[in-house]
Image: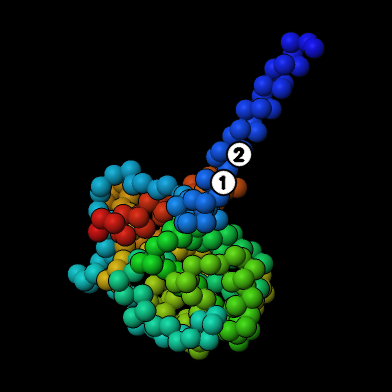
Amino acid sequence: MKKSNYSYIGIAFIILVFGIIFVPKIVTRVQAGDITRTESRSENVFLQTTDATPLSYLIINGERKKVMPFSFTNQNGLTITNKDFDGRVYLVEFFFTTCPTICPKMSQNLVDIQNSFPKRSDFGIASITINPNYDTVEVLKNYADQYGVTHPNWHFLTGKQETIYDLANIGFNLYAAQVEGAAGGFEHSGNFALIDKEGYIRSRTDAFGNPKIYYKGTISQRDQISDEGEQEEISALKEDILKLLDHD
């Protein structure tokens, strides 16, 4: 018999011994719950802040800007108000499900953010439709399922159009309007608002120390730069969410 054949037999013998001795022990530990398997890669997402600089407040007439009270219905038919977000850091966006332009990009970026905080019960998202006549509870539920929404505190909200537009344009100064001839029939801001656990709008500051107020929601972290040369802000937003969750 050739020497190489002896090597193969030796390797096979070692594998056989390993299987006999160790595999039953591993199976027993799994059954006993000593070894667990992680189903989602997103649970292992590692985030860290790059500095300890506190985030800015938006100051209007000498007072910190707080979210206007609101009450809408979510994709599960439940009434959700601003009080449901008390004690949570959350994002606010205005969108509509039939949007043919920026909304799909915004939704994909929010899913990316969702997957960065899968276990944080003190984090949430409010996606508020600007086309409530079409975006019913059922439509919003299908939209959420389509995009892989799993976070229990991500609420897709619908309600009276006038109330929604007041919240967008007055409460947040995030433009939203029904515009004849516009793509999909509506125009709206592509920015995300970041809200702290006490309901205040927060953000980074610019080079002059002024709050940037909102974060671009249409450019993905993967793309880095838009076709117009604008830099992505999703990575900064993730850091700032973490900063508010853990340090503010």
- Label 1 element class: helix
Q: Are marks 2 and 1 in contact (CB under 8 Å)?
A: yes
Q: To which quarter of the image does residue 229 belong?
A: top right
What amino acid is labelled 2 in the image? Ile
Which quadrant does the C terminus fall into?
A: bottom left
Q: Tell me if residue 155 comes above or below residue 218 in the rendering.
A: below
Please give the name of the residue rendered at 49% of the width and 47% of the height, measured from the top-left corner: 231
Tell me what residue is drawn at x 63 percent, y 80 percent. 139
Few, some or many residues within 10 Å of mark 1 (<14, 14–19, 20+): few
Picture residue at 61% right of the left edge, 33% below the top? 17
Spatial distance from mark 2 to mark 1, Cα to Cα?
A: 7 Å
Q: Find disc 2 in the rendering and name its residue.
A: 20
Whether 55 is drawn above or below 83: the answer is: above
Of 114 and 100, which appears nearest the observer? 114
Toward which corner of the image does residue 138 lie, by quadrant?
A: bottom right
Residue picked out by circle 1: 24
Across and down, in percent, residue 27 comes to: 55, 50
Q: Is residue 168 above or below residue 223?
A: below
Looking at the rendered structure, the kind of residue marked 1 is: Pro
